[in-house]
Amino acid sequence: DYRGKANTTSTGAPCQRWDSQMPHQHSFLPEKYECKDLRENYCRNPDGSEAPWCFTTLPNLRVAFCFQIKRCADDVEVEDCYYGNGEEYQGTVSKTRKGITCQKWSEQSPHKPQSFPTIFPTMRLEENYCRNPDNDSHGPWCYTMDPRTQFDYCAIEPCAGDKKPSILLNPDNVVFDHCGRRDERLYSGRSRIIGGHVGNSP
């Protein structure tokens, strides 16, 4: 619900006016979204994306986020912490950063998950606890009980120092018998797909 006057994206691209169709045509007209305050060319978030955004005045760049806008404090109190991206988080937090209750991983309503306990057995997708089975860079998340919000990130923050603890008790004293050449393999990114399109949390 950002209502400030930032009018450039995080990469410095100027924003296009919301009441203009040049250079990009769109359906986010101020008169159709009166409660979203689509004034001038200010960064806004009329569709519940992960951050304020805008159409840009650059013909080759249709939309970009305004990540330079500082996020307000989360709506609910943080209950736990995670290391790295939280892929190994095994806690019991079951509410999102907006206070929405998480949907059970085994349920099919109100949303049909693409991440199932049987697909990711090592991730312990138990009950409706927040997890990160696809190693999302934003941390643990869950499908929600809000029909309008398929998924959201959880009320969990990176642990102090945000440094993943070593699985070796004394890593400095480890001696390797052999050396090896790094295998440069292509990384295949994974995304939560919604209706054929990559989904955004609010």
Image (tube, rainbow, N blue to C red):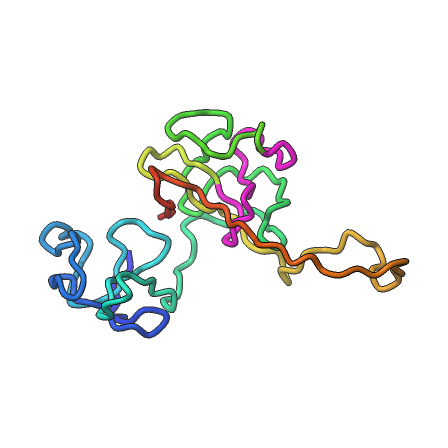
Q: Position of residue 48 (x, y in %)?
A: 30, 49
Q: Quadrant of the N terminus?
A: bottom left
Region in magenta:
120-141
- Identify which residue is drawn at 51% across, 25% down: 106
Residue 138 belongs to the span the image colors magenta: yes
Residue 155 belongs to the span the image colors magenta: no
Q: Position of residue 9 (x, y in %)?
A: 32, 69
Q: Position of residue 187 (x, y in %)?
A: 56, 53
Please state if 18 lies on the left or on the right of 104 as rendered.
Answer: left
Q: Position of residue 129 (x, y in %)?
A: 54, 35
- Identify which residue is drawn at 88% across, 62% down: 173
Quarter of the image for residue 161 reads bottom right
- Identify which residue is drawn at 37% across, 28% down: 110
* Residue that sits furthest to the left in the current view: 31
Please state if 172 lies on the left or on the right of 159 as rendered.
Answer: right
> How many dots with numbers?
0
Nearest the camera: 119 or 138?
119
